[in-house]
Amino acid sequence: MPKLITHKPFSCLVNTPVYRKLYSRKIRKETAKIEAGGIYINIETTNACNADCLMCPHSKMKRAPGNMNEDIFRLIVDSAAESGVHIREFVLSGFGEPLADKNIFDRIAYVKSKGPFYVKIFSNASLLTQEKTEKLLASGLDEIVISFNGITKEVYESIMKLPFERSMENVLALLEARRRRTEDRGQRTEDGRRTTPNPKIVLSCVRLADNKAEVVKFNAFWKGKADAVLKPIPENWSGSMEQDSPWKYDIKGRLWPCRGMWDTLDFTWDGKTILCCRDYDGRVIIGDIKKEAVKDILARKRAMGIRQLEHGDFSDAKICKSCDTMNKNNINWL
């Protein structure tokens, strides 16, 4: 059903009065499950990035560049750990390349020292070296999602503006280093089965017109090498970019609140909490870890979500009105 109603004529169903009433009731039930299931804490330790991807608005960003200082980082982690809220994941990525942060490995280890938290990063892997690879594997990281938006030199470099050979070598070296590390340690369960090696390595290719012909090849190349392969649809970043992609959502009409209003907090490098990860310029600030605790910021954001759901009030989140992810959320709540 979800796949069907993302396309016309089925998409028109979501704008009928009966559907809206039933859907609103569905969201209320789902938010209760989300609150019980835990939240995601996204921490931007740096907003510096060495790539210049076609589908990314990083070059449009007007926020000042910076790296998170250690006091702010620990304040976020400690406040989250002590909040009494279940943390599903700490994602140490924001609007930058986490491997550009010289302290990223120590920061991963710090989060792991605070409890059995799942820690993830998103990276283009172009800055990996042998030393960084070993540090990454030793840090306790649970998952790395690698952006690799092409499987040939010409397409990859045209999209990401990074050297294809170096990035490919880095990813393959990471996979091999993880394999050796697992073999050397002989990690097995009590019944003799080999454990899943950490970190989980996921390859991601955003589906664009430029790499349309390579999506199948991309999947075939990485399948069996990586633990998972993702092929996400590009977003318009709250209306700031028109994406050149044959894959787009066409649902229009009433806005529904994001799941992120209940299950995600995004911190920029200076400790401020932005509305969501798509708010790359920090246009909507909903909190500041230097002034208040994680649980208080979360309560405020969930209250905003309730106003959006009950009254259709997006006055304090106007960027949502031009965001195609809001259209996609008509489906994501199902």
Image (spheres, rainbow, N blue to C red):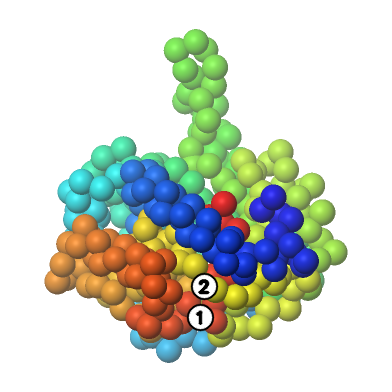
Residue farthest left in this picture: 291
Marks 2 and 1 in Cβ contact (< 8 Å): yes
Instruction: Identify the element where label 1 is drawn.
Output: helix
The kind of residue tagged 1 is Lys
Residue 242 x/y as whole percent: 66, 83
For image coordinates 17% across by 48% down, the residue present is 82
Instruction: Identify the element where label 2 is drawn.
Output: loop
Q: Quadrant of residue 257?
A: bottom left
Residue 75 x/y as whole percent: 19, 60
Residue 32 x/y as whole percent: 36, 48
Q: Nearer the viewer, residue 82 or 305?
A: 305
State the separation of the CA atoms marked 2 and 1.
7 Å
- Any part of residue 104 in sight: no
Residue for badge 1: 321
For image coordinates 62% across by 67% down, the residue present is 16
Q: Nearer the viewer, residue 225 or 329?
A: 329
Direction from residue 218 to residue 206 in the image, left or right:
left
Residue farthest front in this picture: 18
- Any part of residue 178 in sight: yes
For image coordinates 30% across by 44% down, the residue present is 86
Q: Nearer the viewer, residue 247 or 30?
A: 30
Query: On residue 255, which mark appears?
Result: 2
Task: For marks 2 and 1, give the one nearer the viewer.
Answer: 2
